[in-house]
Amino acid sequence: MAKAKIPDPLERRHLVERGLPEAQAGRVAQAYRAAGRQLEALDFLAQAGDQEGLASVRREAVESGDIFLLRAAANAQQDPPRHDEWQALSTAAEAAGKLRYAEDARRLAEREEE
């Protein structure tokens, strides 16, 4: 099995737009994840139908306090972030010194309570 390489930005755009077979999309997603590029992996995880991979990125987003990554992963799963995720993300973001993310996540958690 050939190892997938990370496509350049233009090639990536074309691959996302035209779609890939599930197996190939999965290999590209894993190449992005191995390079620490979780956000870019999401489109390919979704094309591959890799729900566990999407859930893993979502957990990483919460644990790292990355509000943008959580929103993108939740969007790829078509499942909005839950109250407990916003709270956990807020705590993680504050611990990491991402104070703006922490405040935004706190606000979103409060909105979910209503």
Image: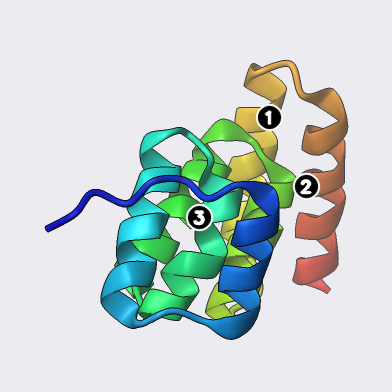
Taking the image as shown, residue 80 lies to the left or right of residue 4, namely right
Coordinates of residue 11 in the picture (x, y in percent)? 61, 59
1 to the left or right of 64: left
Mark toward the start of the polypeptide (1 vs 2) = 1
The label on residue 93 is 1
Frontmost residue, 1 versus 43: 1
**Above or below — where is 10 with respect to 97?**
below
Secondary structure at numbered mark 3: helix
- Which numbered mark, 3 or 1, is in the foreground of this view? 3
Q: How is the structure coloured here?
A: rainbow
Label located before the other in sequence (3 or 2)? 3
Quarter of the image holding residue 12?
bottom right
In the picture of the structure, the residue carrying the numbered disc 3 is 41
Query: Callout 3: few (<14), some (14-19), or many (20+) C-alpha neighbours within 10 Å?
Result: many
Q: Secondary structure at mark 1?
A: helix
Residue found 86% across the figure and 37% down from its top: 103
Residue drawn at the location 39% of the way across and 57% of the way down = 28
Three-letter code for the amino acid on which mark 1 is drawn: Ala
User: Which numbered mark, 3 or 2, is in the foreground of this view?
Assistant: 3
What residue sits right under mark 2 in the picture? 105
Residues tagged 1 and 2 counted as in contact (Cβ below 8 A): yes
Q: 71 or 85: nearer the eye?
A: 71
Q: Which numbered disc, 3 or 1, marks the residue that appears first in the sequence?
A: 3
Residue type marked 2: Ala
